[in-house]
Image (tube, rainbow, N blue to C red):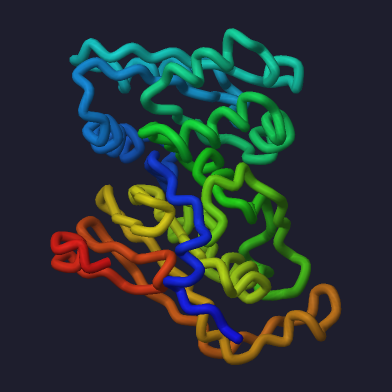
Amino acid sequence: MKKNSSSILKHRIIPKGLLVAIGGNEDKKYDLEIISSILSLVKKRKKKIEIITTASGYPEEVGRAYCKVFTKDSDHTAGFMHVSTREQANDVKLLQRITAADIIFFTGGDQLRITSVLGGSPIEKEIIRRYEQDFCIIAGTSAGASAMSKTMIFGGDSREALHKGTINISTGIGLIDNAIIDTHFVERGRFSRLMQVVSMHPNNTGIGLGEDAGIVIEGGCILRAIGSGITVILDGQHLAHTNVAEIYFDDAIAIENLIVHTIVNGYGYDLCEKKYLKPDDLKTGSG
């Protein structure tokens, strides 16, 4: 018997924190504009921000740049930590900083660095606990956004993405388990690779973030678009057919009835009810 969404929701952990995922941008112009939106979500006058540069190949440069923009014209405090080894992921002092933070921000780079270094560590467990039990904002851009979901895309040629086996997936941090996040989505032509992943995991909603786009996810369900760009939603709940289980490696994939939505600033999507939300829906809370 198929469970309805309300029955499923009764068994879900409703997190007290918020997720903010940003599509990334090479010059960080749009990322930095969206940061003001992140800061506004915390009502405290003086906010404490921790920036995790684990994904980055230039941690000092990137960490200092984000510290500067997070604290510009304010009395907020920001620090960055480059956790690059499993030993560091067990460091008590770094763990205490995570516990004290109002905002935890993951930079871009390589999402496999995040999961391979932090996966199962005390720092990762504390980040998850903070998100679930406290009003803490977990934010990330590019790789830092992709790593949030339980099923994580970490590579694959977008030009051949609708051929079986051409996309790499792994386990992410798992802050959200009903969606798969891809970034640089419009600019790098990643429609087909997210389509392939959703065809294999149709219970998960595909979220494709443009470089100048971001989303805020509340309660693990209600997604609100922020920024000036486009977010693409791939809904596989009514998927009628796919041949992905029957074909061989590198064969072309057939997909029937995959639903596509786009949302922009002021619009949203209910990840639990699989429902498109217009501005009036978000204002009235009908989502």
Residue 26 image offset from top left, x and y in percent: 44, 38
Residue 186 image offset from top left, x and y in percent: 44, 60
Q: Nearer the viewer, residue 265 or 89?
A: 89
Residue 78 image offset from top left, x and y in percent: 38, 14
Q: Please give the count of numbered marks on the rendered protein.
A: 0
**Residue 262 position by quadrant:** bottom left
Quadrant where the N terminus sits is bottom right
Q: Is residue 272 above or below residue 58?
A: below
Residue shown at the point (64%, 20%) measured from the top left: 83
Q: Is residue 124 above or below residue 250?
A: above
**Residue 256 position by quadrant:** bottom right
Quadrant where the C terminus sits is bottom left
Residue 14 image offset from top left, x and y in percent: 43, 50
Residue shown at the point (78%, 67%) measured from the top left: 165
Q: Is residue 31 above or below residue 5?
A: above
Residue shown at the point (69%, 82%) measured from the top left: 253
- Taking the image as shown, residue 176 lies to the left or right of residue 242, namely left
Residue shown at the point (37%, 24%) measured from the top left: 102
Q: Nearer the viewer, residue 232 or 282?
A: 282
